[in-house]
Image (spheres, rainbow, N blue to C red):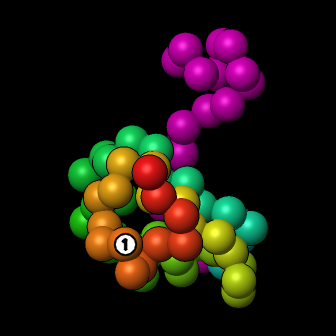
Amino acid sequence: AEAEAEYGLAPFTERPAPGQYDALILAVPHRAFCQMGAEGIRDLGKPGAVFFDVKSVFSREVSDLRL
């Protein structure tokens, strides 16, 4: 609700469609995304999409960038 009010962003109510995004940023390790695994998250991106694992949930080898 806060993100929607402040930034005009609404959370997903359904699983995002595959192949739709240029960049994927895992900033909060919600269970649903962790259970998808790195490949499941990458599948949401277009070919060549960047995957940034901010929380270092997955191993270094499966993300393009991480903190």
Is residue 36 at least partly visible in the picture? yes
Q: Within the image, what quadrant is residue 18 found in?
A: bottom right
Callout 1 environment at 10 Å: few (<14), some (14 to 19), or many (20+)? few
The residue closer to the viewer here, 46 or 25, is 25
Q: Which residues are magenta?
A: 1-18
- Main secondary structure found in the magenta portion: loop
Total residue callouts: 1
In terms of image quadrants, where is residue 47?
bottom right
Say left or right for 7 vs 66.
Answer: right
Q: Amino acid at mark 1?
A: Arg
Tell me if I can see residue 17 in this picture: no
Coordinates of residue 43 in the picture (x, y in percent):
54, 80
Q: Residue at x 55, y 72 (%)?
A: 64
The residue drawn where x is 67% and y is 31% is: 9
Name which residue lies at 74% across and 67% down. Answer: 22
> Magenta stretch containing residue 67, yes or no?
no
Q: Is residue 29 above or below residue 63?
A: above
- Residue 60 lies, with reference to residue 26, above or below; the image says below
Position of residue 26 in the picture relative to residue 57 (left or right): right
Of helix, strand and loop, which one carries label 1? helix
Residue corresponding to mark 1 = 60
Most extreme residue toward the bottom is 47
Residue 24: where, in percent of width, then height?
A: 59, 61
Residue, x 72% and y 22% (percent of image)? 7
Horizontal relation, residue 22 to residue 50: left or right:
right
Query: In the depicted view, which residue is nearer to us: 62 or 17?
Result: 62
- Location of residue 50 in the rendering, given as x and y in whole percent from the top left corner: 64, 70
